[in-house]
Amino acid sequence: MKLSILVPVYNEENTVENLIRSLNSIKGKGAIEDIEIIAVNDCSTDKTPEILDKLRSEGLITLLNHKKNMGKGAAVRTAISGATGDYTIFQDADLEYDPQDIIKMAQVAKEKGLDVLYGSRFLENRTSPLGKFHYLVNKFLTILSNMFTGLKLTDMETCYKMFKAEIVKSVVINENRFGIEPELTAKIAKLVKEKGLKIEEIPISYNPRKHNEGKKIGMKDGIRAVYIIFKYGFF
């Protein structure tokens, strides 16, 4: 399997280099025969551009740049357009998700011939490292999404979403920010029904950071997620 790892990056000078080097270490492990890392600099204003340029010069990433900050969804959309792998997976640049879990996900996807595989932070845990409120918000959004999609997910908002490349390339993504998660889930669910795609979910690890450590998603994004679930659920 050749895996395209799509990395939206905005002001992650403290973590992005460690992340990229960690991602490169999974090449050749398990079902992952080859990788390409497509990093999209979403108009960062710290030292992130210089770090990404260095990593590009070392041949560790393919680097794409936005001339203005557009959000995670827009960066993922840009990265998808350049992907050449058999499968794609999204990777945040903040080290909340462990790249070692990608090895397990790739193996499961290959062995079971899956079209879509979600990595769930809550499949084996009924709590969140960020506390009960964080868990309940994610639980609410996932249940609401499931009501419209007919899926039985435990973590719709997870970053680790793995797709066969031709499938994710066939989906038109409109949301520019974190709304990509419920939008993409709704549109993939439609393809699951129409084309009989094989979708599963497996547990992954999660080491979240707090807002004072640079976490970007907030309450406004949660409210918009509700709107997006209704928007794509009804229309």
Image: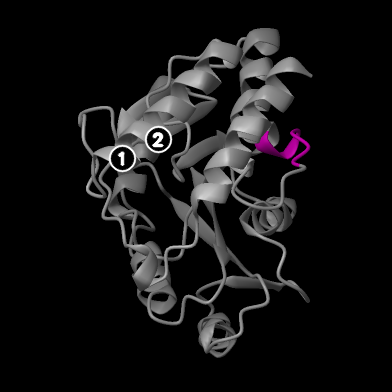
42 inside magenta stretch: no
Secondary structure, magenta segment, majority class = loop
Residue at 76% x, 33% y is 170
Residue nearer the viewer, 173 or 64: 173
x, y percent for residue 90: 52, 49
Instruction: Give the image quarter of residue 7.
Output: bottom right
Task: Tell me the quarter of the picture where residue 88 sits.
Answer: top right
Q: Is residue 164 visible?
A: no
Circles 1, 2 touching at the beta carbon (< 8 Å): yes
Q: Which residue is mark 2?
A: 137
Inspect the image, locate mark 1, and give the three-letter code of the amino acid beneath it.
Answer: Phe
Q: Which residues are magenta?
A: 168-173
Query: Which SS class for mark 1?
Result: helix
Rendering coords of residue 167 (x, y %):
67, 31
Which residue does the image show at 42% across and 21% down from the upper left? Answer: 153
Residue drawn at point x = 55 percent, y = 81 percent: 52
Label annotation for residue 133 = 1
Distance from label 1 to label 2 (Cα)?
Answer: 6 Å
Q: Is residue 159 visible?
A: yes
Which quadrant would residue 39 be assigned to in this image? bottom right
Q: Residues within 10 Å of mark 2 (few under 14, many from 20)?
A: few
Residue visible at 44% across and 74% down in the picture: 16
